[in-house]
Image (cartoon, rainbow, N blue to C red):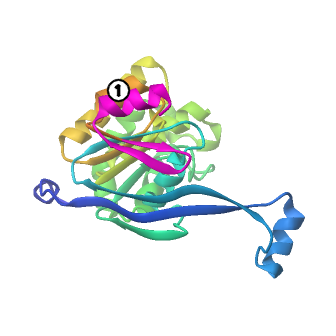
Amino acid sequence: MGDEARREPGIAVELSGVSKSYTLYKNDRERFLALFHRGKGLKTHAALKDVSFSIRQGEAVGVIGKNGAGKSTLLKIITGVTFPTEGEVRVQGRVGALLELTAGFAPEMTGRENIYLKGCILGLPREQVEALERDIVDFAELGEYIDQPVRTYSSGMKMRLGFAINVSTQPDILVVDEALSVGDAAFREKCNRKILELVGSGVTVLYVSHAMKSVQALCSRVLYLVKGKLVFDGDVETALEKYQKGK
């Protein structure tokens, strides 16, 4: 999507009455038997309960809540990693997801080869990936390791490469889940600057974090989840005050 289209004040993400439940299994045997008994008598956990909101193109929205509030489940539904049990999800534009930065790499391929693999998975033409390659390599700061097999990388190196690929492939919507913990302090600051640059260019950003200062710096609006329910949707300061008071 071009810059002109991004400036249009359309809806980038919309959820209507979204709920997500998971079946809880005691062990693998119970999981296997459920295939034949359709899960009768098994316990379920409601990760999200009747969540509705819309996000306009170009908004930077924080998602906060304690562990188990449903934040990661919400992002996985928006990115298509999982699907809602009930409700509707509408997403306009290509999504770049910083959820599990080290996932999806081919370990025997080099870092450079994995750039092209990721580009192919994202549906980008080879010519576009070639044009982005230098920016990705420079941002990741892996030096000569960019041409070594990814299996030789540390977890931090993989995260750097994953972040660089996702922020450089020009997404319309960027979904971030605690991804800014990558690398040292200087690299984290570099990541923060890149996110702010994307926000300024009109990219829609959803940002999950327990770091309230980062939420304040990056976001103009916050969704506050408590035990799967959306209890507040509004300005940053009010949301953080409610979160800190446990309301």
Q: Is residue 224 magenta?
A: yes
Query: Which residue is the extreme one toward the top?
Result: 185
The amino acid sitting under disc 1 is Lys
Region in magenta: 223-247
Is residue 34 rendered to the left or right of residue 16?
A: right
Which quadrant holds residue 219? top left
Residue 129 place in picture, x, y as percent: 33, 54
Q: Nearer the viewer, residue 151 or 123?
A: 123
Residue 234 position in % (x across, y down): 29, 41
Q: Residue furthest front?
A: 247
Would residue 239 be counted in the magenta stretch? yes
Q: Is residue 164 left or right of residue 41?
A: left
Residue at image position (39%, 38%) is 137
Q: Residue 48 placed where, x, y %?
A: 53, 56
Residue 51 figure quarter: bottom left
Q: Is residue 171 visible?
A: no
Foreground residue among 134 and 79: 79
Q: Looking at the image, is 232 positioned above or below residue 143?
A: below
- Give the residue pinned by disc 1: 190
Q: Secondary structure at mark 1?
A: helix
Q: How many marks?
A: 1
